[in-house]
Amino acid sequence: MSKRPNISARRAAQVFKEAVACRRLFRGDGKFFKMSEFWEYLCAENDCWKIKQTKSGPLSDYQRRAGVVAFGDLMTLVVDSELMRLARLGRGFANFILAHEMCHLMLDHHANAKVIKNFKVVDSETGKSVLPPTDEELETNYAAIFLQCGMALFDERLSAVELARRAYTDVALVKKAKSLVRIPEFKSELERISKQRPRVVF
């Protein structure tokens, strides 16, 4: 039986700080955005960022794929054109997929394996999940929600449903992230590193 993926409170706090610093390069804490906008902004601002759209057969939303390729300073999002269309329309899970791919780059995962990072989603008994279920993918899932929601995850006035709607992301994953940031160990680690300079790699 394979080991269940996990993330420590310390690592989760580090990822949160990086994601919040990353989103602040684009929008303030009180503002939300579609990840299609973020990707297109980066491509417009820097010639090293590219989006390559592909066309696939008649797949459902959750079967569509995206991936990132890092080659030197060149960062390329390879994405199904229908998935990108859905993201631009504000579909939550499509935007989450784009955030997930962004976070592979943000967290330097491409430095650990010099290959394309592919993302595939399937339905499971507990919601939607990434194949294969690894510590790296779990870390990236949380990073994506941190990137999309930012400090609003601490706002008790916002339900997971409302926050997911505003941040154009997935409700089930927002619920998990809101639960994580309430854990005392997470708060303690976040406070401990609050004065450290965040590491954002673009």
Image (spheres, rainbow, N blue to C red):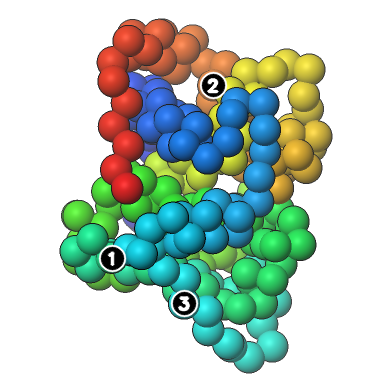
Residue 131 placement (x, y as % from top left)? 46, 63
Q: Which mark is residue 52?
A: 3
Q: Residue furthest bottom?
A: 57
Quarter residue 14 falls in: top left
Residue tagged 2: 181
Task: Judge the density around disc 1: few (<14), some (14-19), many (≥20) Cα neighbours within 10 Å.
Answer: few
Separation of disc 2 and disc 1 at Cα? 33 Å
Q: State which mark lies toward you, 2 or 1.
A: 1
Separation of disc 3 and disc 2 at Cα? 35 Å
Residue 112 placement (x, y as % from top left)? 19, 55
Q: In terms of sequence position, does the residue under pointer 2 or pointer 1 come before the other?
A: 1
Task: Judge the density around disc 2: few (<14), some (14-19), many (≥20) Cα neighbours within 10 Å.
Answer: many
> Residue at the location (23% across, 61% down)?
73
Quarter residue 95 falls in: bottom right
In what quadrant of the picture does the N terminus appear?
bottom left
Q: In terms of sequence position, does the residue under pointer 3 or pointer 2 come before the other?
A: 3
Q: What amino acid type should be assigned to the residue bearing mark 2?
A: Val
Question: Circle 3 — which element?
Answer: strand
Is residue 125 found left or right of 3 in the rendered image?
right
Q: Vertically, is 69 above or below 90?
A: below
Q: Vertically, is 80 above or below 183?
A: below
Residue 164 placement (x, y as % from top left)? 72, 40
Nearest the viewer among 123 and 165 is: 165
Question: Circle 2 — which element?
Answer: helix
> Residue at the location (28% across, 20% down)?
197
Residue 106 placement (x, y as % from top left)? 36, 46
Q: What amino acid type should be assigned to the residue bearing mark 3?
A: Lys
Residue tagged 1: 74
> Residue at the location (54% across, 25% down)?
180
